[in-house]
Each structure stands twice: as C-alpha cells, then as structure tokens.
C-alpha cells in the first residue's frame, strides 16, 4: 500500500467517525473498517509491516501513545517519563514507568510490570523474528519492584528511548504481551 493511500485511509478513519451521528443516547459509536490485508500474525511481536502494526494497534495498547497533534501521551503508563517528573534519571540511564492501575488483559488477568519485562525479553530473544530491535537493544535490564512500576536500565544514554520503547510513535511499533500466557 502506498504511503499516500495509507495516509488517506488513516485520515478517513479519524475524520469520518467524528462526522457520524451517535449510535445511541449514551453517545456510543461503532467504527467498521474493511481491511483488505491479511496480517502475518496476530502476535504483535511478530508484526512484519506497517499494515500489520495498524491492525494490531486496534487490539493492543502501548505504554506511550500519541495524541492528534503527535505529542506523546500516556496509554498503559500513568505518565510519560521525563526528567521533570522524575521518570528519567539525571544521568539518563534509568527510565521509570509508572503503570496505570486496574488495567486488565482480555482474559481478565491484571497488566503488570512483569508484562513489560517479559515483552522486552521476547523482543530481544533471537529466536523471535521481530521486525527490528532498535532502542530495545539499548536496555541492560528491567526491574519490576512492584506490580505497577517498571524500571528500565540502559546500557548508555539513548535520548530517543521513550519515543521507541513500546510506543506507537514509530513505524515498527512493538506491543506489550501478557507474561502469563
């Protein structure tokens, strides 16, 4: 699919639902989208194309998403880590993600910091045919001191890290997967 066609599809997906009347008094709306592309896998770590990622983004949330203006906003993270809020250490080597509380996987199991650590390990596993590891390969380790905190330790300073690690801000976005499955 050409870049122009993808942009037009994305524009239609954003604009048309906003113009449609509400489906009920409560304001519920239904978006139906025809997808002429068969994804290679429904496992988000095995996505091999931008089209795969576009489909999988409808099912999986990232730690950090972007708003309509392209700014990073929290999704599964409670806040976007920055130096100002203490999420990025002074030396730039430690990134702390405070996770939203009460989030559950589709099967009802809670989303935890262990899922973040497990997902990173799955991305880095050489037996998994993931589409790129840029940024993820800068991680030395991830600690999960409690269910709602993931502390990422980097090998070296890597300024674009927050915009690459389990976000939808990149074309080869990676999604988090449940450790219990």
Image (tube, helix red, strand yellow):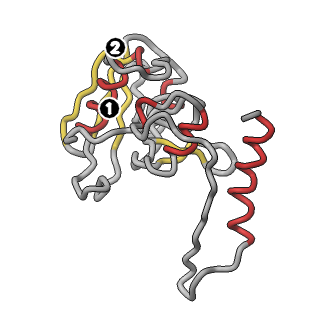
Secondary structure type for disc 2:
loop
**Where residue 174 sits: x, y (%)?**
46, 33
- Kindly identify which residue carries mark 1: 119
In depth, the one of 12 and 153 nearer the eye is 12
**Where residue 75 sits: x, y (%)?**
46, 49
Q: Is residue 158 left or right of residue 1?
A: left
Q: Residue at x 38, y 29 (%)?
A: 95
Q: Nearer the viewer, mark 2 or mark 1?
A: 2
Q: Alpha carbon of mark 2 to alpha carbon of mark 1: how far?
A: 13 Å
Residue 181 in view here: yes
Q: Is residue 10 left or right of residue 151?
A: right
How packed mark 1 is, by other alpha carbons closer than 10 Å (few <14, some 14-19, many 20 or more), is many
Secondary structure type for disc 1:
helix
Mark closest to the chain's N terminus, 2 or 1: 1
- Kindly identify which residue carries mark 2: 126
* Location of residue 2 with respect to 153 vertically, above or below: below
**Where residue 77 sits: x, y (%)?**
40, 45
Q: Residue furthest bottom?
A: 25
Q: Residue at x 42, y 41 (%)?
A: 42
Q: How many marks?
A: 2
* Location of residue 146 with respect to 126 vertically, above or below: below
In depth, the one of 52 and 27 nearer the eye is 52
How packed mark 2 is, by other alpha carbons closer than 10 Å (few <14, some 14-19, many 20 or more), is few
* Location of residue 133 with respect to 14 vertically, above or below: above
**Where residue 45 sits: x, y (%)?**
41, 31
């Amino acid at each position: 699919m050409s870049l122009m066609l993808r942009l037009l599809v994305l524009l239609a997906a954003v604009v048309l639902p906003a113009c449609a009347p509400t489906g009920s008094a409560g304001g519920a709306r239904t978006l139906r989208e025809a997808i002429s592309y068969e994804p290679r896998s429904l496992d988000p770590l095995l996505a091999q194309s931008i089209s795969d990622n576009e489909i999988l983004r409808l099912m999986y949330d990232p730690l950090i998403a972007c708003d309509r203006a392209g700014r990073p906003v929290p999704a599964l993270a409670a806040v976007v880590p920055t130096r100002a809020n203490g999420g990025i250490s002074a030396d730039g080597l430690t990134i702390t993600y405070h996770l939203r509380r009460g989030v559950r996987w589709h099967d009802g199991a809670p989303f935890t910091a262990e899922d973040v650590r497990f997902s990173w390990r799955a991305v880095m596993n050489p037996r998994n045919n993931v589409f790129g590891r840029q940024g993820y390969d800068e991680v030395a380790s991830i600690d999960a001191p409690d269910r709602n905190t993931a502390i990422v330790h980097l090998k070296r300073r890597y300024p674009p890290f927050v915009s690459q690690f389990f976000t939808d801000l990149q074309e080869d976005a990676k999604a988090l997967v449940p450790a219990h499955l």
